Image (spheres, grey):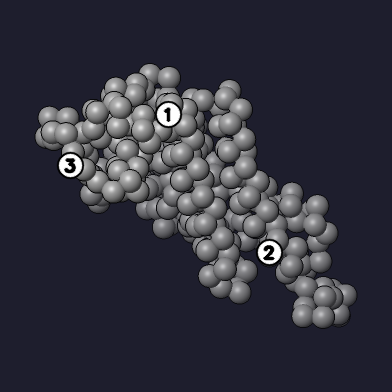
Amino acid sequence: MAYWPVGSGPRPGTTEGRTHVTTSPATRGRSARLPRTARRAQLLVAAQEVFVRAGYHQAAMDEIADQAGVSKPVLYQHFPSKLELYLALLDQHTEALVAAVRQALASTHDNKLRVAATMAAYFEFVDREGEPFRLVFESDLTNEAAVRERVDAVTERCADAIAEVISDDTSLPADEAKLLGVALTGMAQVSARYWLSTEGRIPREAAARLVGQLSWRGLGGFPKTDVRGESAAEAG
């Protein structure tokens, strides 16, 4: 599967239907004074552009400061090191993915629709403007313990959220539900990234629906637990 790695430049075929906001050095001077939270957000946007384009190791704090239109000392006031800046971005986007998965699972009590919504959440995440998924799933810094922990944690947390629903709604024990949660998380992540590498030959909604249908054909075969805690098979 040909994914577009971090630091390899813009991914082809991905501009249609999107609004791109950039902070090109050619079109800006030094930015005006901003409240701390607004400045931090601005710096994170600039850093994401640089990290996605160049990769962590090739990115320089000078370049990030220039991208944001601030001096290097201003950048260091908010983020004392390049690693801390990268970790802040990683935290932001992993939290966003976990929140999207939890929202999908909570959006309905119909399990078939839950599966579809969860797959759609992953496909939407990898298709977001600025390609934040590349920092989460295609980082060139996974040998750094703090990065590896965060990347592993987002998979674990999403799998736990899915497993909780499976365990509540079926007769499966917790360990088996967790295994299925991990499997669904892996399927969602890999299929969404592969879809993106195909440059949209299948519309996003159709691709997510297709993978969701495959997932549901497997999950739908497990007995559903009724309100008394009995599986449908036991009740019959």
Looking at the image, which residue is at 70% across and 61% down?
Answer: 164
Mark 2 and mark 1 lie on one chain; the one further toward the N terminus is: 1
Identify the residue position indicated by label 3 in the image: 32
Q: Residue at x 23, y 32 (%)?
A: 70
Q: Secondary structure under badge 3? A: loop
Within 10 Å of the Cα at label 1, are there few (<14), some (14-19), or many (20+) other Cα atoms? few
Q: Nearer the viewer, residue 63 or 73?
A: 73
Residue annotated with mark 2: 165
Quadrant where the image shows the C terminus: bottom right
Identify the element where label 2 is drawn: helix
Amino acid, disc 1: Pro
Q: Earlier in the sequence, mark 3 or mark 2?
A: 3
Residue closest to the eye, 136 or 121:
136
Q: Nearer the viewer, residue 191 or 106?
A: 106
- Which is nearer the N-term, disc 1 or disc 3? 3
On the image, the x and y values in percent for residue 39 come to 30, 43
Q: Quadrant of residue 220?
A: bottom right
Examine the rendered structure and indicate whether residue 170 appears above or below residue 184. below
* Residue reaching furthest to the top: 58
Q: Which mark is residue 80?
A: 1
Rendered position, 156 above or below 114: above
Cα–Cα gap, marks 3 and 2: 48 Å
The quarter holding residue 133 reads top left
